Image (spheres, rainbow, N blue to C red):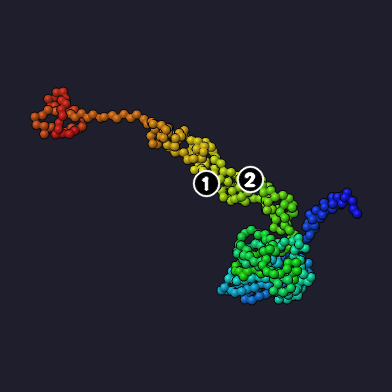
Amino acid sequence: KKSPVGQKLLSFCVAPMLLLLLCVLPLLVQGFYIDDFTSTPAFELSQSEIGTATASQTAAEAGNAAIAGGEREVSAIIVDLQGGVGKTNIDITSGAALLSVNVGTNGAASIVWDGQDSSSTVNYNGINPPLDLTLRGFGQGLFTNVLSDLDVPFKLTFFSGSSAESSAFSMVVPGTSQLINLDIFFANFTGNADPTRVTALRVDIGPTNAVDFRLGAIQTSPDIICGDGIVSGSEECDDGNTLDTDMCSNNCILAKCGDGVRNGLEECDDGNTADSDGCTKCIRDVCGDGKINAEGLETCDDGNTISGDGCSSKCQIEFCGDSVRQPLLEECDYFTEDKCDRTCRKKRKTTTTRRTTTRYTTRYTTPYSAPTVPRNQPLYPYDNKQPVFWYNPYNQL
């Protein structure tokens, strides 16, 4: 019979060992490739008429590639030609399967892993012994990456002994210029196949037209735990914590400007990369930075905070009557000063000079015969007397 002291000592020693084992065991579990898509030399298959071209390649033929079941069977398919000669082309090289479908062609492709049978027909019991995609319970799905310039249907199916025992994952890969990492969890598959007993797998791409599609290596992966310090699956980083304000976010995606989370040296992050909306390239927009804030907080920004130059120190357009005198442009301000006109110039006293016109004529008994003389000049009578100033209504000089 064990003493209480011995039982306590055993518990004290065993508990930490079990905890350590539970922590370390997942790290010792290694994933494996369904296909690493290497081929030496490069594998190429083309189809230029309606129908299917199929070719198989063993792991040895591909330069000891990592291929589930030891062989991959590739098919290039043309569903129909849309007026003219077209082509569906598949290349396997440098860790990717590349599908190219010409303009005017509705094409597709499939890749099958079902053991070394050299047949285009799926052998649902071809991989023997079966694969355990769950890695004895430590795996939660498959991982790959895709890239396409147009939207393309994509389907991944695995089988457990027959066509009736299948589970499939389907999606439309969006057209984009950036590589998309895919964690395909077993929970997202639909069907009744057993992921611990997989005897065949198949990938279908398309049908589609005028597209370039890239499928990266397909592999199993241990549980993806963000914050465990191990980069796995679709994780871009894993810094061993779940902080969201450092350079690796709490979902293990590399932090970047525009992700909506302020981190690192960022002054702000409004979730976009638009300029002049208050946060430009994750730097706060301020008056005097030379960029007009598009949110309406600024009506001008001349790159300084000096008033009186047309754009005030608060980045508002200056104008006559805005209650602020602009020394370089205004003599006064119409809004605050009485003796200021509407152009912000000081009102000046003006003098109106009235011009008096004196008219000259001479005395005649018959005014109608008075001679006409230049305006404002005196008329001298014929007797050479002094000029006589006389208003002559008949001769408006």
Please state the horizontal and vertical placement of residue 154, each as a whole percent of the image.
Answer: 64, 66
Left or right, 329 with reference to 2:
left
Q: Which mark is residue 149?
A: none
| Residue in the image at 74% along x and 73% along y | 161
**Residue sitting at x 22%, y 30%:** 357
- The residue to which callout 1 is attached is 295
Q: Residue at x 51, y 40 (%)?
A: 315
Q: Are marks 1 and 2 in contact (CB under 8 Å)?
A: no
Residue bearing the label numbered 2 = 266
| Image quarter hosting the N terminus | bottom right
Element under label 1? Answer: loop
Marks 1/2: CA distance?
Answer: 20 Å
Can you see residue 44?
no
**Image position, residue 319 (x, y; %):** 44, 38
Quadrant hosting residue 182 = bottom right
In depth, the one of 391 and 256 nearer the eye is 256
Q: Secondary structure at mark 2?
A: loop
Residue 295 location, x and y as percent? 52, 46
For marks 1 and 2, the one nearer the N-term is 2
Left or right: 29, with 168 as reference point: right
